[in-house]
Each structure stands twice: as C-alpha cells, then as structure tokens.
Image (spheres, rainbow, N blue to C red):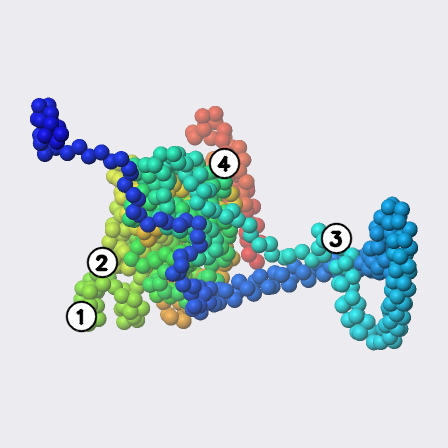
Amino acid sequence: MTDQIQRDGLAQGVPQDTHFEIELDDEPDTRKPVYVDVVSKDDDRRPIIPAQWRGPDSIKATLRRKAEVTGHVAAYHAVRSPRYAALALGWSVVGAARLTGRQLRWWWVAEQEHLRQEAATRNDPDTWSRLTREARAIRLYRGLVLAGEGVLLLITLGLLAAAPGWIVLAAGGALVPVLAHYGRPKTRPIIRPAVVAPRYRKLNSDIVLRAYYAAGLGHAEKRDQQIEFGGPMSRDQRETGSQVLVDLPYGKGWPDVVGAKERLASGLDVHENQVFLTRDKSSNRRHMLFVADRDPLAVPVGRTPLLDCKPRTIWRPVKFGKDERDRLVELMLMWTSVLVGAQPRKGKTFSARLLALHAALDPWVKLIVVDGKNSPDWDKFRLVAHRIVFGTHPNPRDNDPVEHLLAALREILKHIDRVNQVLSQLPADVCPEGKLTEELACDPRYPDLRVWLLVMEEFQVYFETEDQDTNKEIAAMLSRILATGPSAGVILLSSSQKPSGVGAGDVGRLFNRYRDNHAARFALKCGNRLVSEAVLGGDAYAEGFDASSLPVGDEYRGVGYLYGVTDDTPTVRTFLATHVDAERILLAARAHRERAGTLSGEAAGEEVAREARDVLGDVRNVFYAGKATISWPALAARLREVYPEAYADITPDAISAMVRKLGVKGKSVKDADHFDKGVGQGCDKASIEAAIQRRAIGSR
C-alpha cells in the first residue's frame, strides 16, 4: 500500500521526501496563567516597617496628617456640641417613655396574649383558664419587681437631690446617652462622622476587559485579538487607585491605547481624569493601566514647603509638587534649563516663580529676573535680584528695559567666559574634571564661580520689539546663553503663553532654537495641540501627552505635564506660593544673603543707570508753546525728540498708560496731523499740573 502511495506521488510530480502533516488539535498553551483578580502573590511579603513610618520625613508627614485629621474631627464636633446636647435631651425623653412602655408590657405578660386568644378561638376553656392563672401569677411577681424598681428610683432621685452638682451632672451625662440611644430611630444618628471615608469603584478583570473591548482595542471572540494581562491587579502603595499591566493584541500598540483613552474611561465608568496610562519599555503592546479612586488632579497639594524659609541649595532638587498618585515630584535645576508654557491664568507664572523662589533661598545663587509682561508677580524679587527688568517700553518701574536687558545678557555672557577661564586654570586637585562643583560655587575664594539663574518671563516679547536689529541681538545672545550657560552654572527659566509663531527670518529661527533647546518642559493647560507641541516638543504628543487635553477649572490651576526630566512624564499638581508667600520667602532669602555677604547688584543698592524719571515733569516740559492740550501720538513724538536717552522707544499707548496710571485722565483733543478726523485722545496741561500738585501735597 505504501509503495502504491509513493508511485502515485511520483506520477503526480511530488518528491518522495515530502511530508503531509495535519494538526488535528491545537498545540497546548504552555504559558503560566496570570491571575488578575488578586491583591498579591503567595510569596509577597509585607514590609516590616510600613512606608508611612520609614525615615524622619515620612514620620513627620504621617504625624502631621494624623494631627490634621484629629484636629478637624475635634473642631467639627466641638462646634456642633450644643446641637448634640439638644438632640440627646429630646431623644432621652422619648427613650424614657419607650422604656416605661416596655416595662408595662413586660409586667402585663403581653407575650402570652396570642396564646390565650388562640385557645379562645379553638373553644378550649381549659387551656384558656390555665394560661389566665399563669398570667395572674406572673403579673403578681413582675408587679413586685416593678415596685422594687420604683422604690430604688425614688431613693436614687432623693440621693441625687442632696448630692453635689457635679455628681448630678455626671449621672445625667451617663443616663441621657443611654435613654437617647433607645429613643432615637436607628436611621437618625445624633452624631455624624466628621470625615467620610472615600468610596471608589473596585475593578476586576471583567470590568477592564469590557472597557478595552468596548474601546475597540480587541475582540473577545477572536483568539488573536484578545486582551491579556501581564500581572495581577492590585492597589497601589498609597491606596489611591487600582493598577494592572495590560498586553494588547498583536498589531495594536501604544498609539492605539492613547487614542482610545476617552473610550476606555467610558468603559470603566469613570472620569477620564481618573485614567492614567504608562508605557512599558519591554513591549510596544504592553502598558500599565492605573485607575484612580477619584479625580486626583482636582485635589490641591497645599502650600510650598519653602514656607519654612530655611536656606536651600541649587544643587538639590526643588520640591515641585505631587503627581497623579500623590508621589512627590522633584525637579533638579542645576545643569538644566526649564521652559514653562500655558494659557493665561492657568498657573504658569506661579509655577515658574516657585522654581525661582527655591533658587532665591540659596544665598550663593545670583538672580537676574526679566519680566516681559511688567506685572507685580516678580516685583518682590528686587529684594534679592542682581538685575531686574520690567516690560519692553519705558515705564515708572524701568526707564529703559530693553537696554537694561541687553546689558544683563552681555554681563551673563562675560560671566560664562570668565567661569570657563577660571576653571581651566584651577589645579586638578581642586577641579578634578574641569567642571564646576558645589564646593567651588560656594567657596568665597572664587567669587566668579557663582551659579546664576536667568528668569525670562514672557520671553517672546523680546523677540518682537520695534527694532529688528535689537531683536536679532537679543535672540542671538539668548541662544548662546542657552547653549553654553548650563555647563558654566547658568540656569535658564523661561515662560511663555505664546511659544510659537514669533519673529521672522533669523529672529524666528533663533526663537525656535532657543525654545526647543530647553531640557525640561512644563506645560499647563494649552489652547490647542500645536501650542502643546511647541512647549513639550513633538515627541511628547506621539507619546500621548497633549496639554490641550488637560481639564479646565479653577481647581486645575497649576496642573501640567513635566516632560524631559525622567523617563516618566508625571502629571504634576504644583505646590502653591501666593504673592504674600513669595514676599515672606524673599525676605528670608535676603536675610540669608546678608549673613553670607552675597547680596549684589540692585539688591545691594548698586546703581545701574536706572534712575526713575519724573514722567509728569517730562510731559509738562514737552508741551508746545501756547498749547493747552496734546494728543498721545504727539506727546510720544515730543518725548522721543526732547529726551531720546529715556524715551527712544516710547509709543502713544505706552505713554498714555503711564500718564493715566499717575492720575491724569484722557480727553478728546484736536490733532489733524495724527488723526484722520482731526480729533483723538490726549491730555491737557492743566491736568498734568494738577497731578504734579497732588503728588507734592501727598509727599509732605
């Protein structure tokens, strides 16, 4: 038979060594099963010392948290104690009545009533007579017991009447709660809890699988499209949520699950802010799913630890905030540059200022603060700043901000060259690797080796001044500082609400280079995906981080993605430092610098050609002879003409704002040279002189 098959195969042109193997059964699955719905494995060991009691910091935090809860509970119940007393007294009266009724029913043998009724219904006089005799005997006995209770009660009341008041109060305090317990309904407690335990949705494998299949990331009926788990489901260490390692089907990857996050949240029946995905390095199919018990981004993390006002060092990380799992997030400023971007009023300035406050508490760090929006947010840094610049046009706080910025940038570049020169001349035993060290930066023998921090608030405005040559010069110097500064101990902290579409030609190219070369990036709520990419970088969006998708609301201010610091990209809730907090910290920082003898520049009272101009006096002096009024455009032109050293870049809007701020109201004036209709806004000389007079009276 075998020979016949071989001959047939040869006749059909099939070689003799060809085998036809048909698998009748599927190969057995030899993989070890993964049990998902368990909290831990058999060989997991509980820690000998819980995490909250490890180390002095953990112990302090735990004790502080316990003390806060205990204090809250005590205050909560203390405020409501009069209400508790009134309710207890009222329900104690009801309780006394209920106990009296219960005693009377007990004396009357009410529990036997249904037996006598049943005997009467069956027409059984013998049983009825026997039960009646027993009831009479029991009533006699119980009546004697109640009489004894009455006598004891009268004796007790008599003793209490003659007893001291504190004994009466103690007896009443012990008796009223018992009577109130019997009097109140079970559904109406007198004392309600001051702290309500959080409720959360308990996850299991069925819920997770349902969510993934509903999101279109797999198919339950197709074996090659099923979702698998890479480990057991568990609670995280801080008991803030549930987590599990998920393996997507072959052909699905990280971009798929990132794009399906909203549908995943719907399948899990939670808010999207409670779902967090973390990419796994071992496979593009694998990721960690973390589902928080409640929206963690809406929970404030409180005031900054800097409020202790103790000295800090720039060589240690900043305590920046906490992530979605309530873990501390730290940011190392040394050797790096930080870019902060967001929409207005989303916490951008507060976040950047928090980092600068940490540097201010290090007395060996020189600060140069440049505030492009000319706001009060950075004003208190005058206490410690070596140089400080406000705005882009002359104003009462800064008579020539652009020129002062150029001077500060030139000073920084000279410092970078000086640091590199000093380091190259130091012996190997002092500077082994030719790099700046913490010891050298704090050594009084090397004053040129201090660490510098340059803050650029709304830096984009300095790429768009009215002078294109100035724009190029600023852009070139900032790009050079960003490229060479960190290795020389110059840290850049930049923030912007417009991180793209700035400048043209060389200025635009240098702007993009300056923006893109920041090592660490923090993006709060952005207006759209393009702005988010400009802050975080294009790679961040491919990894699933889009700051335009961050939630909106006052409770979410200060929430953003911190990208480029570690392999993870935490969603950070930053610590809060209000304007008052900043002033308190900066006063302490100045005291630290005075003790160390490191105050310099403007904070030390050095003159930097920044004398405040008498704006009202200058305006009065430039009025045309015989003219009582002047328009804003004409006034700006006259100031540029008469005082070019102070008002070379003044604009009509700028001088209008400056004069109005000093108490001069605008009015309609005639000016055919600057207005098409011959009439526009300006001021009159009488108002200027009145404002000068008011100022003189107020200064007496």
The residue to which callout 2 is attached is: 417
Number of residues whose C-alpha sits closer than 10 Å to that of mark 4, classed few (under 14), some (14–19) or many (20 or more)? many
The residue to which callout 4 is attached is: 682
- Counting from the top left corner in percent of width and height, residue 457 is at 39, 49
Q: CA distance from mark 3 to mark 1?
A: 85 Å
Residue in the picture at 87% in, 71% down: 152
Residue in the picture at 36% in, 65% down: 313
Q: CA distance from mark 2 to mark 1?
A: 18 Å
The residue to which callout 3 is attached is: 185
Is residue 637 found left or right of 197 in the rendered image?
Answer: left
Q: CA distance from mark 4 to mark 2?
A: 49 Å
- Counting from the top left corner in percent of width and height, residue 264 is at 43, 39
Residue type of the residue flagged with mark 3: Pro
Q: Residue furthest front?
A: 1
Residue in the picture at 67% in, 56% down: 192
Residue type of the residue flagged with mark 1: Pro
Residue type of the residue flagged with mark 2: Asp
Badge nearest the viewer, 3 or 2: 3
Badge nearest the viewer, 1 or 4: 1
